[in-house]
Amino acid sequence: MLAAACAAIVHGLPAASYTPPMSRASALIWVVLAAILGGLVWWTTVRGVVEVPGSALLDAFATSDVRRIRVTAPDGGAAAIERGPLDGLWLMTLGQNQTSVVVEASRVQGFLRLVAELRASVTDPRPMPKAAIVELIGASGTLATIAIDPEFLAGKGRVALLNEAGQVIRVAATSEDLSALLRPDALSEWRSKALLGWAPERSSSLLIRRGDTGVSIARVGTGWLMSAPLQLKADPGAVQGVSLWLANTTVDRFLDDAGATESFATSVRTIVVGTESLDRRRIELRIELGPEVDARSSLVRITGVDRDSVSGSGAAKALWGPTIAVVQTSVLTGLSDDPASYLPKTSFDFPTADVAALRVGSSTVSRGSDGNFGPNDATVRAALKLLTEVPAASVTLLPGPGGAAAEATRVTLLGLGGATIGAATVEFDSIASRTEGAPSMPAIRVTVDRVQRVIAMERAREFLAALKSIDDSK
């Protein structure tokens, strides 16, 4: 105590607050204890294992080179997946059933991506008696053969690269995702449920038939032309809307048993959408609407056909199907087989600038050097707008040449040099109001050949009177 008090006085501190310095031995003991505790904490803490990726299991492998995938299960079951005649289209056959079905391209690409990402970093001599053998085949032959083991150890499975003799070259670790994709029940889920097997914009023809009547339309240049029941220009939006509708429509379920085929009665309606393959062959999707399953669902028979190739029977070669499926009845009945629904809503599809003169009856009003039509400019421009710009509320295809009423006015559109570029009859009509009890709305009926369009117009009678006044022959 005396020594401590003296030391406090020497250091200028109160005797009660002074603590003698720690000895070197004590400090060393504390350092050793801290190191031991730190080591225990480090040793008992759970840490993620960082694996250094090795080289790719498949050397110089590109998913775009794969044209066919052949899967053989340990029990002998087999599946073959191959590229179809269209870019992005894959077809699959399962087991003994040689009927091909369309599969989702995303499933195939996802599987090939997982294979391409495999890294050879595992040495595991265990046998793989339950492995599925997968052959990846390119344009000139087999690219690689791998064995995917469904047995997992500590949450990891194995994929082995095999040589031609079936011997293991190297092995990679994999997750359960890859093996799960190849289970027999999982392979059936690769099947696409979309009715249309290609992008809607690739469609080049449309046929909708009910019994002996129907409509046939094909792409010609940048437009669409109806060939049956009449040769007329078709509305691109209405035609392409069918392909878009089918592409966005999914099958409720498939019925692949023989009983489903036998129960399929004579088709109520047939829809055929065509396109061109990569090598310019004509490919068609044929959908036949069959009997109703219940109040909301109907059977359909779906077949993909290569129209430019024939089978052993001499008929067009089937690429996929025929497949029996169940869809909502409203899906296909909502697609009209009325030819008029595929015609343009406007009477003529050329701009008003192409019109150099307008003939009403026997009188002609020509466009002046200033671009106007003289005293009748307002009436003529209203007529041109009616015929080339305003969409019709309804379009009807007449069974024969349209007979105009006595009060109808004949209007002829003339181009440069006086050539006729369009002719129509216009007369008064009305459109029933959508509001119950409300009066009908005035309209103008425009008839061009066998196509009749009704266009709503508030002052229809005044317009017709002004138009008739141009004809100085009356």
Image (cartoon, rainbow, N blue to C red):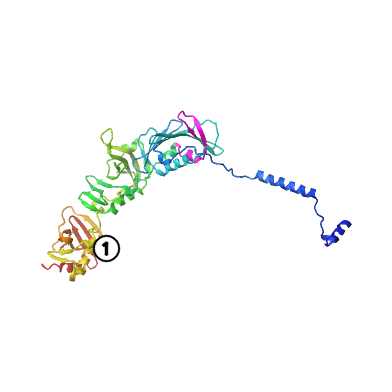
Residue 101 at what x, y percent from top left?
Answer: 36, 39
- Nearer-the-camera pick, 317 or 96: 317
Q: Is residue 1 visible?
A: no
Residue 239 at what x, y percent from top left?
Answer: 28, 51
Residue 322 at what x, y percent from top left?
Answer: 32, 39
Magenta includes 365? no
Q: Is residue 411 above or below residue 96?
A: below
Magenta includes 161? yes
Residue lying at 28% horizontally and 37% vertically, measured from the top left: 309
Q: Quadrant of the N terminus?
A: bottom right
Q: Is residue 184 above or below residue 333?
A: above
| Rendering quarter of residue 45 | top right
The residue where tag 1 is placed is 433
Q: Is residue 467 visible?
A: yes
Judged left or right of residue 195, residue 32 is right
Judged left or right of residue 460, residue 305 is right
What is the magenta range? Answer: 160-183
Q: Quadrant of the C terminus?
A: bottom left
Q: Type of residue at label 1?
A: Ser
Q: How many marks?
A: 1
